[in-house]
Image (cartoon, rainbow, N blue to C red):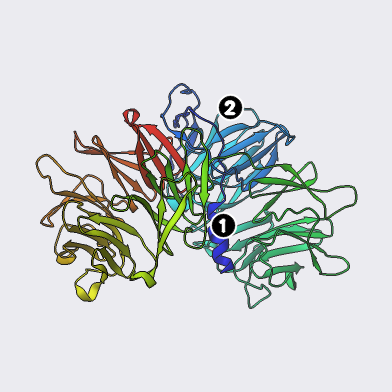
Amino acid sequence: MRKATLLISSALLILVLGGACFAFLRINSTLRETRQRVDKEGNLAFDLLTLDSSSQGVKTGFEPLPSPNDAVTGAAFGGRIYLAGPGGLAGYSSLAAGAQPTLLRTGLELPPAPITALATGRLHGEPSPYLIAATHGEGLLFVTDDTTKPVRQLRPADATARDITAILPLASGDILIGTRRAGLLIYNGKTLRLFRSDFAGIPVTALAGDEGDFWVGTRTKGVLHWHAGQLDAFDQNSGLPDPEVEDIAIGTAGVFVGTPLGVAEFTDGRAARVLAQGLFAHSLALEGSTLVIATIDEGLREIDLKPHQAVREPLASEDLNHAHFFTVDGALLAIGDGRVLRHGRGGVSGDWQTVLAPSQRSLSDRNITSLNFAPDGRLWIGYFDRGVDVLDVHSGHAEHVEDDHVFCVNRIVTDPLRQTIDVATANGLVLFDPAKTTPSERQVLLRRDGLISDQVTDIGFTRDGMTLATPAGLTFFTPSGAQSLYAFQGLVNNHVYTLAAERTSGRILAGTLGGISILDDETVHQNVTLKNSGLKRNWITALLRVPQTETPDTWFVGTYGGGVVQMDGAGHVTSMDVADVVINPNAMFETPQHVFAGSLDDGLLIYNRASHHWSRITAGLPSKNVTAFAENGGELYVGTDNGVVRIAETRLP
């Protein structure tokens, strides 16, 4: 459970940097050095790009909505303090109250990928050091201390090599690069390659040490120690309390490896003891003979390594959770939950003081799953695991709802029958009264009320009532009561992800893990699958009725890995010019001019209903993972796993 908390929390740590009306500095590859994919020496292909700032007047038209200012990493460089996260990079001359940062924002000045780690170092042949930023999906970024110089990007051709979790600049000018799936790489300024075959495919989480002696933390294989050309491996059978490594700290007191079940201390390359047994050690720092531990949900902890191993809670820790440590002018700082704390001086080792408080924001989170405008014009925003915000888009004020039912949100729709806002969650269907200024729950529907499963993935309305999609089948709510339908009664697969319903009839399309079921009056009359149609994939993630002049009964079908196809009322499937793309659950939306589809890692897909062609947009988006849409007053709102942006539909290319 605690590991799951870590994975979710880490995915949700975010940084939004900016106000309104942002100019996008179009990313141009003015310096491009393309390598062969893999040459005879095993070098990996990459592009070395310059993020050109010459087109500052060119705007994409996308405007981010203010979201939590939760940086996840920090570093001191060039006399400034840099904080970074999924929203971008902020540079402060100081952390004094009122200090305004210079901003480089994800999707605007920077590529659409969260920053995961910061470090400083020199490259071979370069006279000055760089601030080096690792990203989740776009490789490495190199920032100089001269703000007039453009940012450079090392972008490997292989997508797995672009997903970077840890970096370790070496005195030689090389950079060790830890990745989520591609193992441990090394970049020397000219070539990029796997460090050694022993490290191929290893899920790296942490790096510490120097070029002759370094430690590699992994997600599943414990910790690896490279020294004097030799590789030693340690797991739960050889000194680690858990094979999952969160962080590594090295100092004169030894080497300390943090895991979800405590900290392993190594001396002379061998496991010596386990400290803080049972404590989820997310991040570590050494300050003299004190080991400082940042946990996921128990704040900061300290261990005095000299006299004893007792774990104590520092003074004024303010319950700072899932933090990371970095140093500035010899002082230890902790960053997390949108705050920066400085370790106290003057002999009070356990004292922490807040030096940067969370900035004001409208939204509660950035991992968006659903968007919907209520009749009163407020935008309802559903989150992966933070409930719902109800946002007044004019004032910027948001009301937040989060409880045992409104937590993991899958879908938000307006109910035309009850005049409610219906929120489909992992723990029931929650009906809200949209007329109330403060969102008020009117009813919660669960299995006890007739649902076939508490987890609701989508909602559809027909002339007869409401249909709910669940991982166990369908449940119909009609004037005659609740009844369910599943595979035994003809449904093509029990796991239903998406629904498309005709409100003037009893027709429903159910998209499942195994294809599409077409239902009339709650009865399956046809199943459409990979075997009996032109479907590219059986896994259906999104359905949308899109009437065409020549074929009014037309449906767009989003799939997991097969892009989007068209289907008519008889179940005949026609390919479209967008394939081999993962469409996110229920991430399709139509306006009179366009159809929009949200992809897992290919950005925003746009279908022009006049020209019948698709186009793709990533510039201006905070992430390539597009999850939800809404429209109001000619403006399109686009939800991603890294925030919400809006744009006038007329400004779309």
Q: Is residue 452 above or below residue 40?
A: below
> Quick check: marks 1 and 2 in contact, CB under 8 Å?
no
Label 1 vs label 2, nearer the camera: 1
> Residue 440 at what x, y percent from top left?
47, 52
Residue that label 2 marks: 149
Please identify the quadrant where the C terminus is shown. top left
> Residue 491 at what x, y percent from top left?
22, 69
Kind of residue at badge 1: Ser
Q: Is residue 561 above or below residue 482?
A: above
Note whether residue 621 is visible. no
Viewer-nearest residue: 589 or 92:
589
Identify the residue at horizontal 44%, vertical 38% (top origin). Answer: 645
Kind of residue at badge 2: Lys
Q: Does 270 sit left or right of 569 as displayed?
A: right
How crowded pointer 2 is (Cα within 10 Å; few <14, some 14-19, many 20+) is rated as: few
| Res. 9 mark | 1
Note whether residue 25 is visible. yes
In terms of image quadrants, where is residue 372?
top left
Secondary structure at badge 1 equals helix
Q: Does 179 sit left or right of 264 as displayed?
A: left
Identify the residue at horizontal 62%, vertical 62% (top origin). Answer: 217
Viewer-nearest residue: 150 or 117:
117
Q: Does 371 sit left or right of 642 as displayed?
A: left
Please identify the residue farthest to the right as the structure is shown.
347
Secondary structure at badge 2 equals loop
Viewer-nearest residue: 384 or 199:
384
